[in-house]
Every structure is written in structure tokens, then in C-alpha cells.
Image: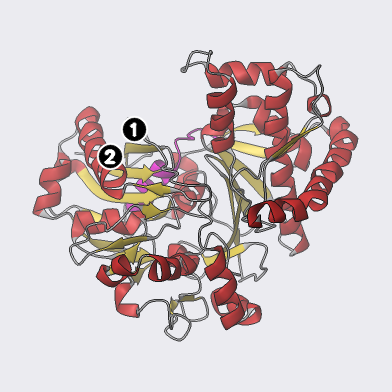
Amino acid sequence: MSRAFLGIDIGTFETKGVVVSDEGVILASARRAHRMIVPRAGWAEHDAEETWWQEFRDIAREVIAASGLPASAIAGVGASGIGPCMLPVDEKGAPLMNAVLYGVDTRAHAEIEDLTAKIGEETLLRRTGNGLTSQSVGPKILWLKRNRPEIYEKAAGFVNSSTFLVERLTGERVLDHYSAASFSPLYDVETNDWADDLMDGIVERERLPRLLWSSDIAGRVTKWAAEETGLAEGTPVIAGTIDAAAEALSVGVSRPGEMMLMYGSTIFIIMVIDKPSQDARLWYAPWLFEGRHAIMSGLATSGTLTHWFRDRFARELPAEDAMRMLAEEAAATPAGANGLFVLPYFSGERTPIHDPHAKGMIFGLDLTHERGDIYRAVLEGIAYGVRHVLETYGGTGNAPSAITAVGGGVRNAVWLQAVSDISGSAQTLRRESFGASYGSAFLAAIGTGAASEGDIDTWNPPAGHIDANRTLAPLYDDGFKTYRGLYEATRSFMHAERSA
């Protein structure tokens, strides 16, 4: 009987799962849509019980059944999810509140400022590899301590999505090193361990997960979890990782210089490097495997912004066809969107400006503009954001040697081409673009000894290429100056509006 591997990923707006053969063939897949809870501006949450565990459990049962294999054929399980998140849990691993999501949640801006002043920017960069931003978990734990002290005191642990799922499956509370680096300032990249001195006043070590590398076996499926999920008791479960890292691995990004550009609810970018890089505009982490490193970046709103546009301005379109029809309208609009510009800072912005108070903007409107013009400007605005990030990478001496595009957004040809045209960068596609759940299954295969890293080129070979249209370079070079200038010219108003 052939071996197979289960990978399940919790995304911002949906959960996806696959059963993959030991040759990389998807035998069954499933997905569940869910919502991001926005209780107030700048906050973003998930109900971990309902969104994370129930969907993991249901999808596991569905894909195992659909694969036609007995549960005993599943040789390993990999779980990944959105991150970094902050979820306080009790001693049994039960959530004490909704999970606070990654950098799109900007509630801890005061704590970021306070901890940066206390620790110092130089020390933060040297010890943690990162400046503190809305992506950092440490300030969010401190926010909880200050604003919800009754929950903070009850918390036996603080976890992210993969930790929560692995604990449900195995009873073990673990976190991979790649994810731990985003718990700044709690993780020391010099020692690859929790930083006891830097966590003073925030949280104690005993309330943080045990550290492992991503493909390490964290534990085995318990009898209770087997009954819940349909998995066989004793099935190995790896530590797992954040979704973006699993997605990068799923498309072969593992060697220094290789970059993943993920088109999801946010744009997220990961580049593998051969030695640590410290720049406060970007994020750093040890890579999934010991001895390698990564620098990351992300926009705050990308696919989220396209969903916002559809829901507000295309309500009359059939739900199942709305995105395709909007893309057709954008394709009918010339490059440059007839003079329109969008700043995609609809939930602040992450890299490279790290401004939680930044605001979205549509600039240049007149009475001739159509919906397709505005939608194209939305896509181009996100592409300008990608260019800003890629130029930042180049400024650190880490320009990518190859870029692979992945994620649901690659189905939008206008968006994909706009990113290549505006950034001047070619992009490669792989045969499978199912995402992080596929990468999690591959990690499980590595963790159980059924595969090695190089096998991903057999599992998921290259299948397409997008080149930049160089004739558009002058247009988009001028457009990028406008894009950058709009933020600089209005930044003081963005900040003043918030404090009014």
C-alpha cells in the first residue's frame, strides 16, 4: 500500500486540505470558506474553535474519505496556518478569546512604541533580527496584559494557529523556529531560543511553546484526535509552520536567492538567503531547516482589497463569476488605469513603511472613469507596493535570482502581469498552486523520511513563465514616483486623522 500525506492549512478566508501521494499527486482536496472578524477598525480576529479546529477536523475526514485510502495509509500530517497570531489558551489548550491575527491587526501600536523605546532599535535588530511592527506577537501579548488582564492571568500559554492544531492532534504544545522569530522580541535569533531577558515584563518562558524545526515530529495523533478527525491513532504529526513558509516550500523555494511571491489575502514574500540579514524595513527568520535563513515582507491588504472592492462595487455580479468579470473589465482598461492610482493601505501598511496609521486612497478620479478603471488601479496599486518591497530587498544586497508566483491570485492574469510589468521582474509558475496545504503535506513527507527537499521539483515542476513588458517601463516608472509621492504628501494627514 502506497504512503500518502495529509496537509491542512488555515487561511485568512478559507481552510484548504489535501491528501498527497508519496509521488506528489493530489489524491483528494477540499476547502471551507470562513470569515475574518473585524470588531473595530484596525482589529482582525478568528474564532479558533470554530474556524481552526472544526474546519481542520471536517476537512481531514472529507479528504481521507475522498482519497479512497484507509486512514492507516496516511503516513504523516502537516498543519500550517495564518501567522503570526496571538491566541491565549488555558491549561487544556482551550481558547480564552478570539485569536488576534497577523500584521493586519494593528491594535498594539502603543506597545510597539513602548517596547522599542525600552529595548532599543539596535538591540532588537541584533537579538531578534527584526524591528517591532504590527507583525510582532510580543507587543500583542503585552496589549492583552494591559487591556485584558483577566484573560492574560488565566492564560497557560500563547500560541499561533499551527501550535493550536498540533496540540489538538497530539497534546504537545510546540512552535517551529521560523514562526517563533515573529514572536519578537521574545525569540533570540543568535541562540535560536526564547530570550528570557527580552521577555521581561511581557510573558514568562513557561507560557511559550517548546521549539522545534518545522519538519520535526512533534507527536502522534491521540485516540481522541483520531476519533475527531478520522486519522489513525499514532500517525506522526510534524511541528508545521506559518502558511506562507509552507507555500514557499510547495513551489520549490528553498535555495539562497529564490523568492516566493504569494498572491493571497495579503501579498507575502519570502526569500531564502545563506546568512542572516538585518534591516528594520523587512522581517528576518531562521528558515524551516537548520542552517538557512529567510527575509520576508508583506503588504497589509491585497486579496482582501479585491474582495472589498467586489463586495462594495460589484454586488450585482454573480458571486461565482464576480472576480473573473471584474478582471475582464480591468483587462479592457489600458495600462496605467487611465490616470488612476490606488494606495492599498486600507488596513495600514506593513513592509517596508510599517505604518499602521496609513490610509487607503483612490487618486485621480474624474467623471469619465468606469468601474474597470478603478479595479485595474487597485491591482496596479498592489503591484506598486510589490515594487516598493522588491526595491527594498535590492537595497539590502538581497535582490532575488528567481521569483515564483503562487496563491489564488495567480488566476487573475491582469494582476499577475501588472506585478511583472510594474516591478520589471519575471515570475515562474509551478504545476500545482494549491498552496500551503500542499507544502505542509510535503513537509510531513520530509519529516517522516519519505522525501527530501529536492524531491519538490518532481512533485511540483515548473509550468509557466510571465515576463515583464519592457515597453511599459517609462509609464510605470513615472507611476511609481506618483505612488510614492502620494503617501509622502498625505502621511501627516493620515496620522492627524487618527489622533483627531
Secondary structure, mark 1, is strand
- Disc 2 target residue: 55
Secondary structure at badge 2 equals: helix
Viewer can see residue 332 = yes
- Seen in the image, is 420 located left or right of residue 486? left
The spot of residue 98 in percent (x, y) is 34, 52
Could you tell me how far apart the alpha carbons at marks 2 and 1 are, in whole angstroms? 7 Å
Residue in front for this viewpoint, 85 or 383: 85
Find residue 270 and report its horizontal and vertical position in percent: 58, 54
In-image side of 229 versus 182 (left or right): left
Quadrant where the image shows the N terminus:
top left
Residue 469 is inside the magenta segment = no
Question: On screen, 23 above or below 246?
Answer: above
Give the residue displayed 74% in from the left and 50% down from the top: 388
What residue did someone put label 1 on?
32
| Residue 400 can be seen in this image | no
In this picture, residue 119 sits left or right of residue 149: right
The circle drawn on residue 205 is none
Residue type at mark 1 is: Arg
Q: Residue at x 49, y 50 (%)?
A: 244
Specify the segment rendered in magenta.
430-446
Q: How is colour applied across the structure in the image? A: secondary structure
How crowded is the residue under tag 2: few (<14 C-alpha within 10 Å), some, or many (20+)?
many
- Relative to 467, say whether 325 is above or below: above
Instruction: Compare marks 2 and 1 and give the one earlier in the sequence.
Output: 1
Q: Position of residue 66 (x, y in %)?
A: 23, 28
261 in relation to 216, above or below: above
Q: Position of residue 8 (x, y in %)?
A: 33, 43
Amino acid identity at mark 2:
Glu
